[in-house]
Image (cartoon, helix red, strand yellow):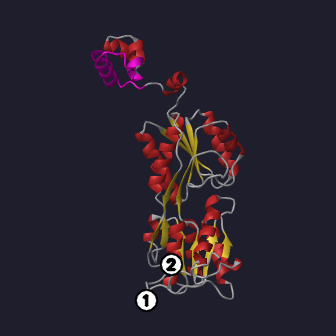
C-alpha cells in the first residue's frame, strides 16, 4: 500500500503539504493541490483512518443502536441512516438490541469504545444505565422513533395520533364497533402512545376500550399470535384487531388463519408501521405508515449538528393511513361524525 511519503515523492512536495491537501487546508497553491491529488489517484493512496482520528479527535463514524433488526421498519430506518450519513461523509456501525436493555447497553459501550463521533438510539425501554450515562456526559446523541422522557436529547419521531383517528373513522364507517388492540411494551414510549391514541380516537365515537380488548404484546410476531388467540376465545370476540406494530400484525394474521377464519370476513385486521410485505399478504393489510426514510435522514442531520457544535433540533413528522382490504370494503353510506364531547 502506498504511504503518504510515496504520495509526497510522486507529487514533488513535502509530507506536510500532502497532509494539508488531504485535510482541506486553504494555504496550499492550486498547482500543488492538483499534483497531490493526481499522485493520490495514481498510487491509489488511502489515508489511515485510525491515525487521522487520533490527530483530529474525530472518526467520522456514527453509531446506530436499533431495537430489532428483524423488524422491517427498523431495517428500512437503518438503511436511510446509512445512506444519509454516507452522503455527509460519515460511516455507520449498527448494533441490534433485540428489544433487550442489557444488549442495548453492550452495544452502546462497544460503540463508545470505538470512539464514534455520535450515537443514534431507538431505546428498548426506559433506558439502560450506560446509555443514560453517555447522554448525561455530553456524548452527541439523538433518539429516533422512541425516546426517554426527561433526557435532554433531540428526538426524531413520527406522530401517529391523526393517522389513528383516521383509522378509527375508517373502521367506524365500515360498521365496526368492537375494536381491540395488541399493545406494545408499556415501558416504551411508542407502546404507551399508540394505546392512548387508539382509546382517544374510539372515545370520539362514543366507543369504549375495555380491558378485555387490550392485549399486551412485545412487538414480536409470537405475541401477536398469542394475544389474538385470546381475543378469539372471548365470549364476544372483537370485530377488529389493531396491532401496534407490523410483526404483531403478522402474528395476528397467523392466529386467525389457524382457526379457519378469514380476514376481513370473520374479523378485520389493521396495523401500525406499514411494510412492503403488507401489499402481498392475503388480503393486503390496512396500516399506518411512518415516513421512515425521512425520519432516518432527519436523525442523521440532527446528530451531525450536535457533533459539529450546533444544537440539533427535535423533529416530529406525521404518519398516514394506508387503506387496503383487510378491514372490509368501504360502505356507500357516509360515516357518522365523531361524538362531540362537552367541555363544560
Label the magenta part by its dominant secondary structure.
Answer: helix
Q: Residue at x 70, y 40 (%)?
A: 133
Spatial separation of the CA atoms under disc 2 and disc 1:
13 Å
Q: Is residue 135 above or below residue 202?
A: above
Q: Is residue 322 above or below residue 171?
A: above
The percent position of residue 117, horizontal first and vertical second, equals 55, 35
Q: Is residue 173 above or below residue 216?
A: below
Question: Residue 319 bears which disc, if any?
Answer: none
The percent position of residue 306, horizontal first and vertical second, equals 54, 38
Q: Is residue 103 above or below residue 279?
A: above
The percent position of residue 199, horizontal first and vertical second, equals 62, 73
Residues in magenta? Answer: 19-46
Front position in the image: 343 or 206: 343
Q: Farthest residue toward the front? A: 344
Q: Report which quarter residue 280 is drawn in.
A: bottom left
Q: Residue at x 63, y 75 (%)?
A: 343
Question: Residue 169 bears which disc, if any?
Answer: 2
Q: Earlier in the sequence, mark 2 or mark 1?
A: 2
For disc 1, the marked residue is 333
Report helix, strand or loop for mark 1. loop
Amino acid at each position: 500500500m502506498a504511504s503518504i511519503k510515496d504520495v509526497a515523492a510522486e507529487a514533488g512536495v513535502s509530507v506536510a503539504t500532502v497532509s494539508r491537501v488531504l485535510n482541506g487546508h486553504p494555504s496550499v497553491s492550486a498547482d500543488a493541490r492538483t499534483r497531490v491529488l493526481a499522485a493520490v489517484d495514481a498510487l491509489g493512496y488511502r489515508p489511515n483512518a485510525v491515525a487521522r482520528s487520533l490527530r483530529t479527535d474525530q472518526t467520522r463514524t456514527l453509531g446506530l443502536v436499533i431495537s430489532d433488526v428483524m423488524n422491517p421498519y427498523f431495517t428500512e430506518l437503518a438503511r436511510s441512516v446509512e445512506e444519509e450519513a454516507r452522503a455527509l461523509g460519515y460511516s455507520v456501525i449498527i448494533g441490534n438490541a433485540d428489544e433487550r436493555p442489557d444488549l442495548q447497553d453492550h452495544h452502546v459501550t462497544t460503540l463508545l469504545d470505538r470512539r464514534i463521533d455520535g450515537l443514534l438510539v431507538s431505546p428498548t425501554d426506559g433506558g439502560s444505565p450506560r446509555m443514560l450515562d453517555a447522554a448525561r456526559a455530553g456524548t452527541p446523541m439523538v433518539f429516533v422513533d422512541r425516546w426517554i422522557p426527561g433526557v435532554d436529547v433531540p428526538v426524531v419521531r413520527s406522530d401517529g395520533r391523526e393517522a389513528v383517528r383516521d383509522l378509527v373513522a375508517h373502521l367506524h364507517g365500515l360498521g365496526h364497533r368492537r375494536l381491540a388492540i395488541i399493545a406494545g411494551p408499556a415501558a416504551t414510549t411508542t407502546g404507551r402512545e399508540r394505546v392512548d391514541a387508539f382509546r382517544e380516537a374510539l372515545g370520539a365515537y362514543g366507543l369504549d376500550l375495555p380491558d378485555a380488548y387490550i392485549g399486551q404484546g412485545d412487538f414480536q410476531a409470537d405475541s401477536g399470535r398469542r394475544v389474538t388467540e385470546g381475543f378469539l376465545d372471548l365470549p364476544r370476540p372483537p370485530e377488529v384487531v389493531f396491532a401496534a406494530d407490523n410483526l404483531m400484525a403478522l402474528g395476528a394474521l397467523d392466529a386467525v388463519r389457524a382457526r379457519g377464519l378469514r380476514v376481513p370476513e370473520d374479523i378485520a385486521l389493521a396495523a401500525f408501521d406499514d411494510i412492503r410485505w403488507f401489499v402481498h399478504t392475503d388480503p393486503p393489510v390496512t396500516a399506518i405508515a411512518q415516513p421512515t426514510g425521512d425520519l432516518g435522514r432527519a436523525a442523521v442531520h440532527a446528530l451531525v449538528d450536535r457533533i459539529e457544535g450546533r444544537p440539533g433540533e427535535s423533529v416530529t413528522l406525521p404518519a398516514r393511513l394506508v387503506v387496503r382490504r383487510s378491514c372490509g370494503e368501504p360502505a356507500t353510506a357516509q360515516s357518522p361524525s365523531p361524538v362531540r364531547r362537552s367541555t363544560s
